[in-house]
Amino acid sequence: MPDPVDTLKVSDLPLEDLVACHECDLLMRKPVLALGEKAQCPRCGYELYAHRHSVVERSLALVLAALLLYIPANFLPIMQLNLLGQSSEDTVWSGVVGLFDTGMQGVAAVVFLCSMGIPLLKLLCQLAVLLSIRWRIGRSYGLLLYRIYHHLKDWGMLEVYLMGVLVAIVKLADMASITIGLGLICFVSLLMVQVLLEVVMSPHQIWQALSGEDDHAGD
């Protein structure tokens, strides 16, 4: 665990040697971690950062998997609804188009951005950042894209859309015959891959690699 810093001595230490807990704001000396180790706040136990193995390679694999899942998750049928002899197949994209065609253009735009546009932009930003580290080129652009990615994190709401789909399935289950489509399986898989990517892609190591402090983020 890192050592708390006496407030009277803070001015004597360079900023790069300090770290603050995001939960309780305790100021500490930044510890040097070996591979596989993680730093925790001695006061509240919050994980400050970790030094994980093969961050870039593992993150690249997950980003590519997410991009491969993106198209089927959004354009394959999420469910097939049979009601009073009428059958329809719904996808994420058809939901956006349906909202637009019924005069709710604003809602359609929000759904498109939060369920399709921003998640794709986040993945592309992550891909560009990881490639800039892996190939050691364009790190200044990588820094910019990683900042953009962090601003976009709160706007990609795949889990909210998934909850909406699940609520619709539960409510319609007694009224119609519902068949789960391959699109829903891909959509859930995409969400799980993105959650795992958030865990694997250690922000501390990515920032260090982009700033040139750590050229071994892929080790």
Image (cartoon, rainbow, N blue to C red):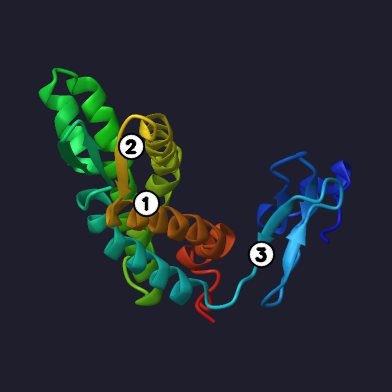
Q: Give the answer, above or below, for where 35 lies relative to 140.
A: below
Q: Which residue is mark 2?
A: 114
Q: Amino acid at mark 1?
A: Leu
Q: Which residue is mark 1?
A: 144
Does residue 143 appear anywhere in the picture?
no
Q: Quadrant of residue 160?
A: top left
Secondary structure, mark 2, is helix
Which one is closest to the eye, mark 3 or mark 2? 2
Secondary structure, mark 3, is strand
The residue depicted at 45 percent of the width and 68 percent of the height is 59
Q: Residues within 10 Å of mark 3 (few under 14, many from 20)?
A: some
Which one is closest to the eye, mark 1 or mark 2? 2
Q: Give the answer, above or below, for where 99 lies relative to 162.
A: above
The residue depicted at 40 percent of the width and 73 percent of the height is 61
Q: Residues within 10 Å of mark 1 (few under 14, many from 20)?
A: few
Q: Nearer the viewer, residue 20 or 22?
A: 22
Does residue 56 appear anywhere in the picture?
yes
Q: Position of residue 143 (x, y in %)?
A: 41, 56
Q: Which mark is residue 50?
A: 3
Q: Amino acid at mark 2?
A: Cys
CA gap, disc 1 and disc 3:
23 Å
Which one is closest to the eye, mark 1 or mark 3? 3
Q: Position of residue 178 (x, y in %)?
A: 31, 42
CA gap, disc 3 and disc 2:
30 Å
Q: Residues within 10 Å of mark 2 (few under 14, many from 20)?
A: some
Say whether residue 57 is left or right of residue 12: left
